Amino acid sequence: MGELLESFDRHCQDRGEASALLSHGEGEKLSFDQLAQRISSWCEKLRQARLPTGSPVAVAVGNGVDFPALFLALLRLGHPMVCVDSSLPSQQRADLCRRLAIPTLLHHAGQSGSTASGAASSIERLTLDLAEPASLPANTILVKMTSGSTSQPAGICLSEAALVAGIRSIGTGMEIDHRDRMLLAIPLSHSYGFDHGVLALAVLGTCLILEAGYFPGTILRTLERDEITFLPTVPPMVKALAESNWPTRLPLRRVISAGGPLLPEFAQRFHRASGHPVHQFYGSTETGGITFETAPLEADAQATVGKPLPGVRVEMESDQTLVVDSPANFLAYLGGDPRARRPVTLADRGEWTASGRLRLTGRTADLLKVGGRRVSIDAVETMLRQVDGIDEAAVVAVDDPVRGDRMVAFVVGDHSPHASTLPPGLLARDVRLIARIPYTPRGKLDRARLRALAAAGVPAEN
């Protein structure tokens, strides 16, 4: 038995009657002892299914008690789990499994468009007829999916040692332990949600409270009713909660934001509305947690993502590309070279502040060639956000037979930047007003949606 299951079993032994998992959407509340019983029940069901020995199993059951129970049951039986987004339509889940050569899918058939979970009895098993199932690197116990923001989602193979090292680094850096009560409204199937949800529960013994989505009213009621102490968020969630009426005297001690850039003005609005500062967290599916901001109200912390977490080393190449060396680094891409990836070169670029904080400056994929010169999408977006009257801005590129790339800027606000003082090289020729910037369920800019609107050559939808 590995360290992950040993940690969970120790929590069950020492704190069996303590609350482990609450799911308001399902009306379930489990102690550690009851969760252990649920895991045993799943182990029996999976044995009866006679799955091929050691074969990977895809799971798409949403934010419910059966997600962590299935992970721990599959781990006990020696089956790596592949995290699949339950918001995908059933056919897309099956297509993803075929592309990745995963022979078994456990999901709520017919459900899509939500991270909610149904009853355990409604979870169905889909067996795919594959010529040759996927072969995973040795020691793989989990496959996380990347966001697919720049290409098709890829499977990231992770070992138990990497997962345990990653959550212990996060727990130490963020001061999370068994006394905390963690509210998870972000999907457990995503890397950010899995680490702060499933791993915090199993390894750190943190009580986990699940919500099916981030609706401000529901979140605020749960914060108060369940005495939440720790709230992981994404930028759209921060923005929505900043516009809400907050209850007073909450035991909430820490709010973190990850998954994408959080504009300083949104963090400031959130602080004014809630009384709680937002701590920036930065990580990747390939490396786990990278940096964390412990003192977000310090002047040098603005627009940064903090300092490296314990045990994580961050370096920069000559072009400011980030290189991460961490015990939480992944083994390999599913179907790719099985050699360990350490250190990992990311697609992000950054710079260090005088106080040793990391400031992200863009992505290598976001360098465009416009009219024979290199232009950074991040630089254009930053300049646009500084224009009076513009609340948000996002820039994408479409092919242009003359200029190479043609920038299309989508802005939220009541002012056109055409008459602004932006340098000519940083001014997109095609600027479109939009009611709201689209985000994915992971909290990232939905650039695929924006590129589709840009390529269509029609005004953005309101």
Image: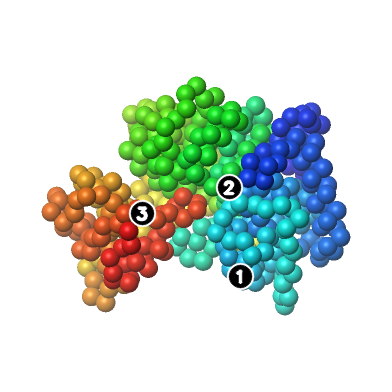
Return the residue at label 1: 91
Q: Does label 3 or label 2 sit earlier along the sequence?
A: 2
User: Mark 2 is on which residue type?
Assistant: Ala
Q: Residue at x 81, y 65 (%)?
A: 52
Return the residue at label 2: 212
Residue 287 at least partly seen: no
In screen coordinates, is 230 left or right of 248? right
Return the residue at label 3: 437
Q: Is residue 204 above or below residue 323?
A: above
Contact, mark 3 vs mark 2 (Cβ under 8 Å): no
CA distance for labels 3 and 2: 22 Å
Q: Residue at x 76, y 41 (%)?
A: 35
Quarter residue 170 falls in: top right
Q: Does label 1 or label 2 sit earlier along the sequence?
A: 1
CA distance for labels 3 and 1: 28 Å
Q: Which mark is in front, 1 or 2? A: 2
